[in-house]
Image (tube, rainbow, N blue to C red):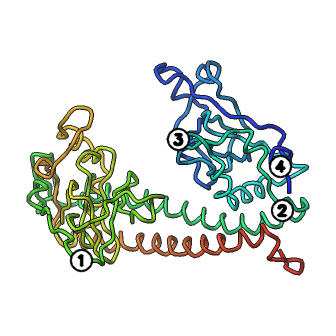
Amino acid sequence: MTKIGSVCKRVCSGGTPKSTVEEYYGGGIPWLNTKEVNFNRIYSTESTITEAGLKNSSAKWIDKNTVIVAMYGATAAKCAIGMIPMTTNQACCNLIIDETKADYRFVYYAIVNSFSVLASLANGGAQQNLNAQLIKDFEVALPSLETQRRIADILSTIDDKIENNSRINHNLEKQAQALYKSWFVDFEPFKGGRFVDSELGLIPKGWSVKSLGEVTEERRDKVGARQDVKVLSPVTSGHLVLSEEFFTKQVFSESIAKYLLVKPGDFAYNPARVNIGSLGLNEYQFDGCVSPVYVVFRCEKGYNHFFDLYRTTSPFKDEVLSRSSGGVRQTLGYKDFAMIHIVYPPKDVVESFNSLFEGLIAVQKSNLKENAILSSQRDALLPLLMSGKLLFADWNC
């Protein structure tokens, strides 16, 4: 058993440049927030800072291959590997591993394997925190460097495949959005035909401009006494997810009788959060439900993919922003949502688009299914390898 601090060349936290100073942000220096630390490899950060921001704060550069452990709040004890040089906020404990003593990948997997134990050491009142000393003193079982590398190679190979599938899916998402733009914004496949004037500009003949109220229907069906309905939550990634799997604690009411049903193919959004992308499609093959404060709507049959991509466009986001009402917490009820006007393609055009789009979806679903299997295999192997219970002296690794 070895203290983590004893295999590090350096252990440090970071800092946050003053948020009110605009010139401290938006530069070329990656700056990591702990909300991005989630048992992952980090190749880029959501925020960047400038040289001035670096010099006028406690932020400091850390090397690539640094093991990063979150110390505060809900993310405490979660970890990641920084794959690029970067800076972090003060809630990150950054472990720069001495490569002569330990493999940084092995240290990362050892912390992942010990997550629940390390997280239990967090102390404090309402916000449970770790500190750098606790993490430095935390002990992990450390085999020989050669054995560390062999174990890390096995687990990293699985994570490499998961990461590659995720990268492919991200590219497919971009292709889908580009395909939508080509067909329904730039009208590329229809340039050889006739165009007519409309309130939204020139559109292909046979197309129309309609309000969302004309082509969608609000649904207010309640769960009632049903026991087979799962609670869904719209998240900022633009998907409806199972609440019980996405959140670490229950975020919905004990009784869901008054919750609104969201059938497969229906959309739901939180009127107070739609401006940040919390609108999603029920892509599951079963009925879900959402809080009664949400809005649920259904589009014309066959137009689900069209609407799912339309909600990601700038025109839709601009309309949402302009029609949202209220002060700090803006809302968009269905009545205002229904007033948004869109260029609406004929059914035969949408069916042709669907045949192309669903090919991309099939690859994405296959990759997601494979990732779920790989994650399960990795999670089963992790404790066995870390404990030494799974021996591989005769493996050809």
Q: What residue type is disc 4 on? A: Lys
The structure residue drawn at horizontal position 85% and vertical position 78%, both measured from the top left corner, is 396
Q: On the rendered structure, is 208 left or right of 237?
A: left
Q: Residues within 10 Å of mark 4 (few under 14, many from 20)?
A: some
Name the spot of residue 181 as percent of width and height, x first: 32, 54
Distance of label 3 from label 2 (alpha carbons): 36 Å
Within the image, what quadrant is residue 351 found in?
Answer: bottom left
- Name the residue beneath numbered marker 1: 226
Circle 3/circle 2 CB separation < 8 Å: no
**Label 3, on which residue?**
127
Q: CA distance from mark 1 to mark 2?
A: 52 Å
Amino acid identity at mark 3: Gln
Give the alpha-carbon distance from disc 4 to disc 3, as whole Å: 26 Å
Describe the element under mark 3 as helix, strand or loop.
Answer: loop
Q: Nearer the viewer, residue 280 or 44?
A: 280
Q: x%, y% of residue 227? A: 28, 77
**First-in-chain label (4 vs 3):** 4
Distance from Cα at disc 4 to Cα at disc 2: 18 Å
Q: Dot 4 corresponds to which residue?
A: 3
Q: Residues within 10 Å of mark 2 (few under 14, many from 20)?
A: some
Residue 76 location (% of width, % of height)? 60, 47
- The residue at which mark 2 appears reads as 149
Say which label, 1 or 2, has the lower sequence index: 2
Disc 1/disc 4 C-alpha distance (Å) = 52 Å
Residue 282 to residue 373: above or below: above
Q: For the view shown, which residue lies furthest in the front direction?
A: 125
Q: CA distance from mark 3 to mark 1?
A: 37 Å
Tell me if residue 237 comes above or below residue 88 in the rendering: below
